[in-house]
Each structure stands twice: as structure tokens, then as C-alpha cells.
Amino acid sequence: MKAVLESGDALLVVDMQNDFMPGGSLAVPRSDEIIPLLNRYIAWFHAHDLPVFATRDWHPPDHCSFLPQGGPWPPHCIAATAGAAFPAALVLPADTRIISKATHREQDAYSGFAGTQLDALLQADNVRRLFVGGIATEYCVRNTVQDALQRHYTVFVLLDAVRALNLQADAGPQALEAMAHLGAIPLHFEALNA
Ligand code: VGL
Ligand code: ZN
């Protein structure tokens, strides 16, 4: 699949945060490897005057998804901590639209659309097509892509710029298949304006 960037396109970088990097409290294997390519996508969109959105997990210290509260995950991405910050190597433009999610103790949210202004911000920018990369493929990427499709955005999944947690072997590939089945279009960087 090829894609030529046009007005109405936007890049959406999902949950690229230190706690999800190798060595972080909820490390996604090899998630640091996609930073250089995400930087190329970001630069490409920025050069075309197209908006860049970035979601981030932004949890309170006693979030319901954390193990001490009976949730499935070790504490991670606590708001305003170093673990919740974007990796220093990720080069986001100054005008990046940042969307914080799962900010309330009693509510978890894998999708960037859940309880946020994302949809309203996309509409304000007249976005029609979303190019989605980041982590984790089978959690926040998948849920964000599903919600975007449900809201009738055209969605491209950046196959070379996502990484899976893969707690179950093949969870990542299965999630990519499920997204494609729902209508998301798989894309590699080389196919952009190729
Ligand atoms: C995520 C687990 C817990 C994600 C967030 O960004 O995919 N996964 N919180
Ligand atoms: Zn989380």
C-alpha cells in the first residue's frame, strides 16, 4: 500500500513514554528501536505542515490498573514523573498536540479517545486520515485504532513503528491482523510518498 500525504492527514504517536521503554517499569520489548523511525515520520509530517498528536498514559499514583490496587500492571506512567515523560530521543515539534489519558484513579483507558479531547482536537484540525504508531500494539495502539475507525477516520497503521508487549506470544501480530480486518491500512515508511 502506498500513501501520498495530503491535507487532512495527521500523525498519532501512541504512548511513547520512558516507563514503556527497555528498563522502564512496564517495558515493551525493543520499543526504543522505533524512536529513530518515529522521528522520521514526525519530521515528514511536520515538513508537510501536517499536525502531530501524541498520547500519553498519565496515571495518578494509586491508579486502579496498578497491582497494589488489584489491577494487572506494575505502577507506570505516573503523571509528571520521569517515567511518564517522552524519551529524550523522541523529537516532537513544539506544536505537538499532547493528549493525556487514564488520568482518573477509578478509570483505565487504553484508547486515546477514551475520556479525552482527542476527537475534538482532530476535528478542529480537519483531520480525516490518521497515521498511527507507538506502543503497545495490542493494547493502546489497537484500542486507539479501533476507536478511530469507529469514528470514521481512515487509519493507517505504521507497521515499522509499533511494538508489542507480547505477554502472550503472537499478541502483536494477532492485533495487527484484527486491526486490518476492521479496515486499518498497514503501511511502511518507504510507502509514504514513494
Ligand atoms: C498500556 C498497559 C497499561 C499501553 C498502557 O500504552 O499500551 N499498556 N497501560
Ligand atoms: Zn497504563
Image (tube, rainbow, N blue to C red):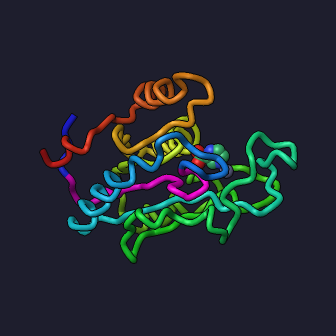
User: Residue 180 location, x and y as percent?
Assistant: 40, 29
Q: Is residue 131 magenta?
A: no
Location of the C terminus by quadrant is top left
Res 18 → quadrant? bottom right
Q: Is residue 133 above or below residue 179?
A: below
Part of the protein shown in magenta: 5-21
Q: Viewed as shown, does residue 190 lie left or right of 62?
A: left
For the residue pair 164 and 158, the one nearer the viewer reads as 164
Q: Residue furthest bottom?
A: 94
Q: Is residue 88 above or below residue 172?
A: below
User: Residue 132 location, x and y as percent?
Assistant: 40, 48
Please say whether residue 133 is visible from this viewpoint. yes
User: Residue 70 location, x and y as percent?
Assistant: 86, 43
Q: Viewed as shown, does residue 155 lie left or right of 20?
A: left
For the residue pair 86 and 11, the one nearer the viewer reads as 86
Q: Residue furthest left?
A: 194
Res 139 → quadrant? top right
Q: Viewed as shown, does residue 68 lie left or right of 129?
A: right
User: Residue 138 location, x and y as percent?
Assistant: 55, 35
For the residue pair 45 and 26, the one nearer the viewer reads as 26
Please say whether residue 111 is visible from this viewpoint. no
Q: Viewed as shown, does residue 135 lie left or right of 64?
A: left
